[in-house]
Amino acid sequence: MSTSRASVRISSSIGPYYDSPMAVTERLAPGELRDTFRGPLVVPGDADYDAVRAVYNGMVDNRPLMIARCTGTADVIAAVRFAREHDVQVAVRGGGHNLTGHSMSDGGMTIDLSLMRACRVDPRRRRAFTQGGATWAGFDRENEVYGLATPGGVVSTTGVGGFSLIGGMGWLMRRHGLTLDNVRGVELVTADGEVLHANAEENAELYWGVRGAGPNFGVVTTFEHEVHPTGPIVYAGSMFFPVERSGELLRLYREYMEAPASDDLTIWLAWLAAPEAPHVPPEVQGQMCFAIAGCWAGVLEQGEEVLRPWREAGPLVDEFQPRLYTNLQQMLDKTAAPGGRNYWKSDYYDSLSDELIDAIVEWLPGLTRYSQFHLGEMGGFYPRVGEEETAFRRRDARYFTQFVTMWYELEQDEREIEWTRAFADALKPYATGGVYLNFIGDEGQRRVREAYGAKWDRLVALKRRYDPDNFFRLNQNILPDA
């Protein structure tokens, strides 16, 4: 299997708004856009070009002919209209954590929101108004001032936009649902360069579709999130156990989470190499371990008792303790550093059966140094949101897996990709269909359609209405002529 750079760059050769790079270069004159654009315009040859075009996944090496670094909604409008006028392929970048590389054009134009990071909090209304390029680090910092938070990512460098438009699994999910369940409105620039507002009262159908398939309909420049009293101190952290005990501990997890567990508790599992850190004994560092990580967001004094079954199980490392919620949000940042070569897959499951547990344990020895495997339970508030309330699908699923395969050497591509596919295939007989699109790469139209199921036709109708030419197609794409 070939895994050269060309094989992992994002295809740009189908549909309108693309021509050969030379032809695009002849008509894509930055000077024309500078008259209406306030932010920096970065082009090949600029000193910061390589730094600005870099994305999270080191397998992606896309080279746009122009990166329009927007400073506000007016810049987004100018960039969209310019790209449309010149028939140029467009990618949209928010926080830059996108796995597929869809956020960076190859031979076209990238509309880059990463300079648009402002977050304003209205504590009286419990609302946060956040620009499309913000990351969770900035969002959480502003909300912490008021003791507020909303379900977000588990890595603080992740963009708010991608989570809010596709799903959003995080430490508060069992208490308050997905990130998109807390989006109360958006400001969006359409493919025609017009500004729309969408919420429950205004453009309500678009508001429905944005929460689950949002990148398909426009560039969201501002989000309105509902935020909730949270701490700011929560009882949270991680524990590490010998990986050889995985089967036993998976069964403990099943019993623990199906007790039933309180909505205030979110605990996920991870298999990863123990970090080189002061709190980890030297003899444990670097060992592949079974780990739990999570958050008790209830009465702080009850945290010790809630975690008692895991302490009685005898962890090698125990760092659950009272901590700032913002500290929890940054706890895993070092395990998800940008630049590695990443290949991910994911599935949903109705139950954590003995057969599924045995299959997981059988494949775990293949995990290499930088790779991880995650499994989480999705009860609490998550299934109480009606299936038809948003474009997101599979409120009935109980568990998810995430195969996070990461490495740094090009020569390892074939081994890592083939092993991840084989591991995922081994668990397929127990999967229930559907997929969380934030946890996979570009797996084609069939997989995208599987993510939305019976909602597909409704989403296609929305796409035809707001983007009939598929101007915004560098995403997990919904085709307007599907």
Image (tube, rainbow, N blue to C red):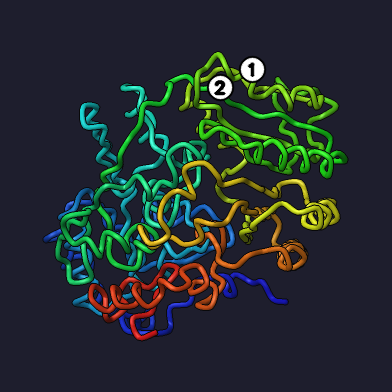
Instruction: Count the marks.
Output: 2
Question: Most extreme residue toward the top, as rendered?
Answer: 301
Looking at the picture, tell me which residue is in the foreground, 270 or 430: 430
Q: Residue sitting at 67 percent across and 53 percent down?
A: 406
Q: In this view, does 275 lie to the left or right of 119?
A: right
Q: Distance between the residues labelled 2 and 1?
A: 8 Å
Question: The disc labelled 1 sits on which kind of residue?
Answer: Glu
The answer to whether the residues at label 2 and label 1 have Cβ atoms under 8 Å apart is yes
Choose top left, top right, bottom left or bottom right for residue 479: bottom left
Q: Mark 2 points at which residue?
A: 235
Question: The disc labelled 2 sits on which kind of residue?
Answer: Tyr
Looking at the picture, tell me which residue is in the foreground, 197 or 89: 197
Using the rendered image of the protein, determine whether residue 413 is visible from the camera's viewpoint. Answer: no
Q: In this view, does 389 lie to the left or right of 357?
A: left
Q: In the rendered structure, which disc, 2 or 1, sits on the residue that comes first in sequence?
A: 2
**Residue 90, x across and y down, in percent:** 33, 70
Dot 1 crowding, Cα within 10 Å, few <14, some 14–19, many 20+: some
Choose top left, top right, bottom left or bottom right for residue 126: top left
Q: Mark 1 points at which residue?
A: 304
Q: Can you say which quadrant of the picture contains the N terminus?
A: bottom right
Using the rendered image of the protein, determine whether residue 436 is visible from the camera's viewpoint. Answer: yes
Q: Can you say which quadrant of the picture contains the C terminus?
A: bottom left
Viewer-nearest of discs 2 and 1 = 1
Q: In this view, does 138 lie to the left or right of 245?
A: left
Q: Residue sitting at 44 percent across and 44 percent down?
A: 177
Mark 1 element type: helix
**Residue 231, x across and y down, in percent:** 43, 21
**Residue 233, x across and y down, in percent:** 47, 19
